[in-house]
Amino acid sequence: MKHARIDEPAIAELVERFYGYARADARLGPVFAAAVHDWPGHMATLKDFWSSVMLGSGRYKGNPFAVHTALPLEPGLFQDWLGLWHKTTAELFEPEVAAQFDARAERIADSLKAGLFFNPSRPAR
């Protein structure tokens, strides 16, 4: 049965399943393998992050942008990440709830991409 509301157990299940997929992904997996050395700690941080984003819990105290600037990312990886995210939310949640998670993830991805890759000196295409 799919989750019909957002709560801490649902967030925990989403984070666990999604990052299981991401770690096994041909393009995303190597990025995570190189960057994360304490998976239990990282998973706790991710659950705190999504709890803060979706429930306003305030548990996450980090800086996602600063963390991502140190990673070997390219813009296309964000589409891969979002594709897996959408797949996972569709598996776990009723459509209205999945849409809430998806909208937040898309805004976060757009914000990170803008911060990481926007170059005002580059000519527009």
Image (cartoon, helix red, strand yellow):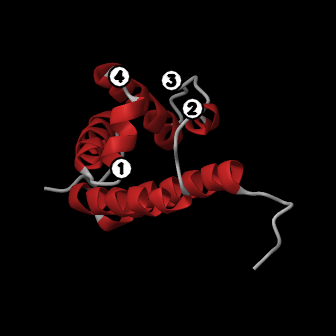
On the image, the x and y values in percent for residue 35 come to: 42, 31
Q: Which amino acid type corresponds to the residue marked 1 in the rendered image?
A: Leu
Foreground tag (1 vs 3):
1
Q: Position of residue 121 (x, y in %)?
A: 86, 61
Amino acid at the residue labelled 2: Val
Q: Are marks 4 and 2 in contact (CB under 8 Å)?
A: no
Q: Are marks 1 and 4 in contact (CB under 8 Å)?
A: no
Q: Which residue is mark 1?
A: 28
Badge 1 crowding class, 10 Å Cα cut-off, few under 14, some 14 to 19, many 20 or more, is some
Q: Secondary structure at mark 3?
A: loop
Crowding at dot 2, Cα within 10 Å, few <14 / some 14-19 / many 20+, comes out as few
Q: Looking at the picture, does residue 116 appear above or below residue 40?
A: below
Can you give x and y, in whole percent of width and height, for residue 61 in the image?
58, 22
Is 72 located above or below residue 38 in the figure? below
Q: Along the polypeptide, which appears first: circle 4 or circle 3?
A: 4
Which residue carries the number 2 mark? 67
Give the CA distance from mark 2 to mark 3.
17 Å
* Residue at the (70%, 49%) spot, across then down: 115
Q: CA distance from mark 1 to mark 4?
A: 15 Å
Residue 37: mark in rendering:
4
Q: Residue at x 35, y 19 (%)?
A: 41
Crowd tier of the residue under label 4, counting other residues whose Cα lies within 10 Å: few below 14, some 14–19, many 20 or above: few
Q: Between 75 and 45, which is closer to the camera in this rendering?
A: 75
Q: Quadrant of the N terminus?
A: bottom left
Q: Quadrant of residue 15?
A: top left
Name the residue tied to disc 3. Answer: 59
Left or right placement of residue 18 versus residue 81 in this view: left
Dividing the image into 4 quarters, which one contains the C terminus? bottom right
